[in-house]
Amino acid sequence: MRIVDVCEVTKPISSPIRNAYIDFSKMTASLVAVVTDVERDGRRVVGYGFNSNGRYGQGGLIRERFRDRILQADPQGVLDETGDNLCPHKLWAAMMANEKPGGHGERSVAVGTLDMAIWDATAKIAGKPLFRLLAERKGRTADPRVFVYAAGGYYYPGKDDGALRAEMRGYLDRGYTVVKMKIGGAPIDEDRRRIEAVLEEIGSQAQLAVDANGRFDLETGIAYARMLRQYPLFWYEEVGDPLDYALQAALSEFYPGPMATGENLFSHQDARNLLRYGGMRPDRDWLQFDCALSYGLVEYLRTLDVLQQFGWSPSRCIPHGGHQMSLNIAAGLGLGGNESYPDLFQPYGGFPDGVRVEGGYITMPELPGIGFEGKSDLIKVMRDLAE
């Protein structure tokens, strides 16, 4: 058993939308395939992965550093203790050989993308859905029902309050009970009007979360906190720079409601510093670490260990990214749910065909691996790369 090839292609996922910090007109993503010499059901096992939106494709790093480390690793040295499957932890160590600590940046995205494909291949070789494989390894019972919320509400040329309301109504009609919109890309009075328009539209049928995408300095973050605390929001997300833990801690004095952050923290060390210094409250706040951006599931398991050390439950994690990898982690390891993009970043966003949102939850299909084969538009693109 061995990995015989690692393929990468950088794909555009461009869109005219913008948040408070960036527009997505030139956004890209890396799609990777880890090809093995194993066959299941008459087909060669290939694991697939891609990076989450908001960080660009990492083809250069993948092709120049990490691909060769996987292919040059001793095939027997990266198998699990049975010798019958890959060991993602050993492959992760091979990828990170000769890498200095710190400086997570883009490197964490490249490794996270490959790690996703390795876990997909591992679960396929085992003939199990990844979420069930993870639950078994942790000695717990997997829950195939996963809470999901609809992320949208971006700024868009010509998008008025009526279009924003219609977007949010569409999410409710598809079964979501929590919706999210962007703030911070317009003056505070305009954002207040947008928020009130959405709240009027969704009424008691759903809750609203708002996301500033790290745009605010402390003064602006406090001004928004004072405005937002009058509304029954699901959370107030990523107020300021993700590494400004003092700013995040200060906000808790002005905003008693739930806050969320973490999507732009890329290691268990960063997670530890957030919990040490960021004033996050385990009884109400949410953590959004995204394995596809932060060295993958191998590192995410270390992050969950850090959370446990600080008295946090995995159920306070709702990862960023809207991808099926985090859905499997949520179902297998007991996270609080997952972000989803019903209409954006296709074909990478969304769920396998036939999966529906009911009362804010989806039920994981029983597909080997991450389940990409169940999403017809996505698996076509994937197989074009490596099969």
Image (cartoon, rainbow, N blue to C red):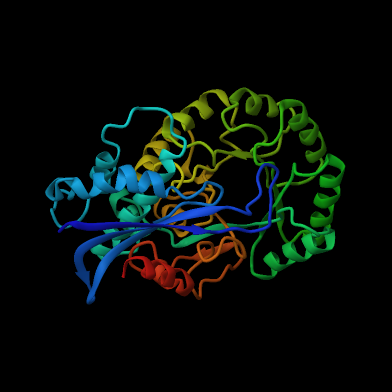
At which x and y percent is residue 295? 39, 42
At which x and y percent is residue 227? 82, 38
At which x and y percent is residue 331? 43, 56
At which x and y percent is residue 321? 53, 52
On screen, residue 70 above or below 285:
below
Asked whether 196 or 217 is in front, the reply is 217
Quarter of image, res 174:
bottom right
What's the residue at 73%, 46% (across, down)?
233
Quarter of image, res 216:
top right
On screen, residue 285 above or below 379:
above
Q: Is 147 left, or right, of 194 in this rendering?
A: left
Is any part of residue 366 visible from this angle?
Answer: no
Image quarter of the N terminus: bottom left
What's the residue at 15%, 57% (across, down)?
84
Q: Is 362 left, or right, of 162 in this rendering?
A: left
Asked whether 1 or 10 is in front, the reply is 10
Quarter of image, res 141:
bottom left
| Number of dots carrying numbers | 0
